[in-house]
């Protein structure tokens, strides 16, 4: 098969018409993003209608009623079960670390659609048409790409999809790779054109547009390579700084590279600036009491905040904030103040009182946690800390108390997410006259000392039979050197027991048997609806999902949420 594209000599009118066509398809590429939004809204509408009808029918029925069993055995019930299994499959990982199958399928479909727009209506197989289209279509995706990265409450996509920034971030990463592929193709095809025409050196030395384009392509390659998971795990600061600097400089570079793409770049920069402004307006400064949790690598922060901020944080458990350290609070001999001015780290709100919030963090190798750990040596100081938020998608969850069973699983500091939810659910169940046995909390920690921060809170946990505590390190591991996890999470490995546990243990020096725990929750009846929430190490969440999936394949209705901050 011969090469389908040729170097065409076009007239001025033909070049003008080509430009009109390219601009038109750039608009098509940008506006086509509306289609998945509309489809999702229609899907939500259908689900809402079906849910309301089901609620009316099932109001007086119990999970074991013959009516529900008959409905499950019907053709409609069989379809619902197949749909649940298909959705569960789509939300599962294609391969470990590859992301969800549904996202990969959507990425392939979106890439195919954009490539179709690049190649459609190419007059006479004009080589330069498709070469220019690669760049036009790629840049048309910049506003959507920047919109997917917005953290603030001004994010329109977070509102439309009822999601949080963390749930949109994988889509930001996927679209970034698609843009990189298109821009790389744009640059490669142009360089091939210059080589074939024998003008490469002339263009590289005498054409400002080409020079800027080459710099932009190199910057995009650096951005793409440093965004890889391996680089983020090796040094998140390197990724963050390069991502921020190049993310801000690329639009101006492309602005001067080609005038016809400027509208997309202005839109992207406007979204970036709006997000920054909204985040600044959502940030307050509070004075903190910072202490070390004895015999652990945990640091506890109690930060006084205004009542208006505390009210938002009390509105729902399991929310998180972004923390940064102002220059005046940075300990001597730590990272430069300029680094902390742009570093905002996410931490889950472990507790909210009438005057402050509590954060519990694990100190790793990052500049923020190291600086906070150093501040624990100044017990009488109350350094100011910047807090942005709260954020999180839990306010958009279905009513968890309406589920027949709820399973909450936390690993290490992941308990800062599930424990407040557990307390809230216990209160809701009590108000509804339901048994507290409907909710189970499993907390796996490295050592007994790691539970100390939870004991200090108002609601007692010492004699709670629905709370299962597991310690995952043994005394025989006392002389092992601790290595920080590569993904920033808590590893289910053993460390020495330093003291008697503050809370009652369900299993001493052992990992939780997640399969057994899941089976116990699901064994009460096929008609019961179950909610499962997990926050912890990737391996633990993956194993838990595998065991829950066995019950989904049997037709069980499950609400699943894995809370995490992927690097």
Image: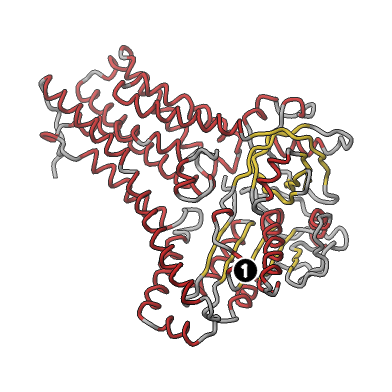
At horizontal 78% and vertical 54% (from top left) the residue drawn is 480
Q: Secondary structure at mark 1?
A: strand
Task: Bin the neighbour count of mark 1 within 10 Å (Cα to Cα): few under 14, some 14-19, many 20 and up.
Answer: many
At horizontal 74% and vertical 49% (from top left) the residue drawn is 352
The answer to whether residue 499 is left or right of residue 555 is: right
Quadrant housing the C terminus: top right
The answer to whether residue 335 is left or right of residue 90 is: right
Whole-percent x, y for residue 6 in the image: 14, 32
Report the front residue among 532 and 188.
Answer: 532
Quadrant for residue 235, please give it: top right
Report the front residue among 499 and 159.
Answer: 159
Quadrant for residue 530, please give it: bottom right
Q: How many marks?
A: 1
Report the front residue among 313 and 508.
Answer: 313
Report the front residue among 414 and 567.
Answer: 414
At horizontal 53% and vertical 47% (from top left) the residue drawn is 164
Colour style of the rendered protein structure = secondary structure
Q: Which residue is mark 1?
A: 406
Query: Is 194 rendered above or below residue 77?
Result: above
Query: Is 278 rendered above or below residue 456?
Result: above
Whole-percent x, y for residue 479 in the image: 81, 55
Query: Is 511 rendered above or below residue 7?
Result: below
Quadrant housing the N terminus: top left
Whole-percent x, y for residue 331 in the image: 79, 29
Whole-percent x, y for residue 155 in the image: 49, 40
Report the residue that reaches farthest toward the top.
206
């Amino acid at each position: 098969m011969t090469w389908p594209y040729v170097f065409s000599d076009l007239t001025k009118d033909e070049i003008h018409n080509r430009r009109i066509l390219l601009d038109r398809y750039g608009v098509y590429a940008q506006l086509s993003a509306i289609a998945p939004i509309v489809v999702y809204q229609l899907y939500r509408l259908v689900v809402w209608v079906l849910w309301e009808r089901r609620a009316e029918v099932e109001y007086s029925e119990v999970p074991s009623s013959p009516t529900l069993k008959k409905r499950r055995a019907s053709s409609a019930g069989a379809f619902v079960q197949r749909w649940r299994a298909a959705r569960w499959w789509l939300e599962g990982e294609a391969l470990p670390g590859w992301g969800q199958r549904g996202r990969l399928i959507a990425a392939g479909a979106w890439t195919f659609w954009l490539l179709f727009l690049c190649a459609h209506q190419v007059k006479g197989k004009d080589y330069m048409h498709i070469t220019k289209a690669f760049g036009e279509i790629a840049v048309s995706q910049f506003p959507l790409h920047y919109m997917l990265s917005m953290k603030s409450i001004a994010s329109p996509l977070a509102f439309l999809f009822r999601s949080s920034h963390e749930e949109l971030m994988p889509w930001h990463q996927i679209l970034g790779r698609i843009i990189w592929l298109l821009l790389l193709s744009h640059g490669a095809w142009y360089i091939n054109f210059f080589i074939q025409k024998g003008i490469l050196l002339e263009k590289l030395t005498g054409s400002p547009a080409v020079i800027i384009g080459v710099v932009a392509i190199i910057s995009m390659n650096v951005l793409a390579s440093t965004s890889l998971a391996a680089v983020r795990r090796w040094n998140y600061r390197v990724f963050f700084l390069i991502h921020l600097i190049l993310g801000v400089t690329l639009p101006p570079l492309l602005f001067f590279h080609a005038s016809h793409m400027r509208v997309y770049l202005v839109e992207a920069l406007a979204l970036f600036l709006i997000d920054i402004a909204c985040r600044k307006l959502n940030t307050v400064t509070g004075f903190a009491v910072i202490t070390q949790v004895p015999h652990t690598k945990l640091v506890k922060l109690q930060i006084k905040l205004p009542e208006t901020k505390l009210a938002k944080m009390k509105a729902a458990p399991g929310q998180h904030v972004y923390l940064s350290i102002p220059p005046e609070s940075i300990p001597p001999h730590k990272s430069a103040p300029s680094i902390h001015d742009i570093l905002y780290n996410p931490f889950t709100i472990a507790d909210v009182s009438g005057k402050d919030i509590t954060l519990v963090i694990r100190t790793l190798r990052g500049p923020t946690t190291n600086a906070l750990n150093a501040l624990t040596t100044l017990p009488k100081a109350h350094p100011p800390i910047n807090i942005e938020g709260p954020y999180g998608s839990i306010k958009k969850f279905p009513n968890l108390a309406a589920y027949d069973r709820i399973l909450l699983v936390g690993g290490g500091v992941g308990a800062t997410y599930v424990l407040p939810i557990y307390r809230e659910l216990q209160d809701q169940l009590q108000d509804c006259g339901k048994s507290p046995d409907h909710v189970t909390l499993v907390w796996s920690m490295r050592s007994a000392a790691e539970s100390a921060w939870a004991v200090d809170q108002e609601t007692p946990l010492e004699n709670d039979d629905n709370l299962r505590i597991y310690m995952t390190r043994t005394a025989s591991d006392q002389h092992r050197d601790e290595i920080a996890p590569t993904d920033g999470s808590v590893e289910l490995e053993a460390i020495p027991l330093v003291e008697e546990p503050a809370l009652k243990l369900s299993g001493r020096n052992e990992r939780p048997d997640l399969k057994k725990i899941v089976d116990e929750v699901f064994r009460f009846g096929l008609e019961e609806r179950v909610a499962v929430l997990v926050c912890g190490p990737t391996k633990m969440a993956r194993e838990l999902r595998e065991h829950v999936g066995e019950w989904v394949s049997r037709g069980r209705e499950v609400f699943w949420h894995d809370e995490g901050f992927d690097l």
